[in-house]
Amino acid sequence: MRSKKEKIQQKKNRVRSRISQDLPRLSVFRSGKYIYAQIIDDKTRKTLVSVNEKEIENQKEKGKKSKMTRSTLVGEIIAQKALAAGVKKVVFDRNYYLYHGRVKALAEAARKAGLGF
């Protein structure tokens, strides 16, 4: 019987096998409290741009916001940083998460901000 970690790794591998290796990938990780996004170049194995909610909370106003609005904000900021770094097209890596909720909000905000995928 497989453990929970093995099942998660199997889902990650399945998603990554369908992703093209030619473009950098926008990888998303969400915990119960925060959401993280980073753009990774798999050829050089380096992180080009990264954003997390903790940084944004320190920079922006400290009002109570829902997780969805914070995810949207992370998507906008990752797109702005990526465009500033010269990355215009990426491949979206949702890890083992379903494409809905906070993951979808982040992806759509990044698209609206000008990042292509």
Image: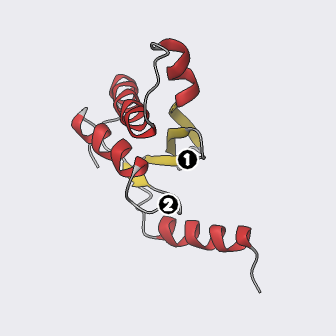
User: Residue sitting at 53 percent across and 50 percent down?
Assistant: 42
Q: What residue does disc 2 label?
A: 97
Q: Amino acid at mark 1?
A: Arg
Residue 43 image offset from top left, x and y in percent: 53, 49
Q: Amino acid at mark 2?
A: Tyr
Q: What residue does disc 1 label?
A: 30
Contact flag, marks 1 and 2 (Cβ < 8 Å)? yes
Q: Is residue 50 left or right of residue 8?
A: left
For disc 1, the neighbor class at 10 Å (few under 14, some 14 to 19, many from 20) is: some
Compared to 101, does 33 lie above or below? above
Compared to 40, does 52 lie above or below? above
Q: Quadrant of the N terminus?
A: bottom right
User: Residue sitting at 62 percent across and 73 percent down?
Assistant: 10
Task: Determine the image quadrant of residue 115.
Answer: top left
Residue 37 image offset from top left, x and y in percent: 50, 39
Say which element carries label 2.
loop
Say which element carries label 1.
strand
Task: Determine the image quadrant of residue 74.
Answer: top left
Compared to 61, does 68 lie above or below? below
Q: Nearer the viewer, residue 1 or 12?
A: 1
Q: Nearer the viewer, residue 6 or 45?
A: 6
Which residue sits furthest bottom? 1
Q: Of the residues under marks 1 and 2, which one precedes in the sequence?
A: 1
Residue 28 image offset from top left, x and y in percent: 50, 47
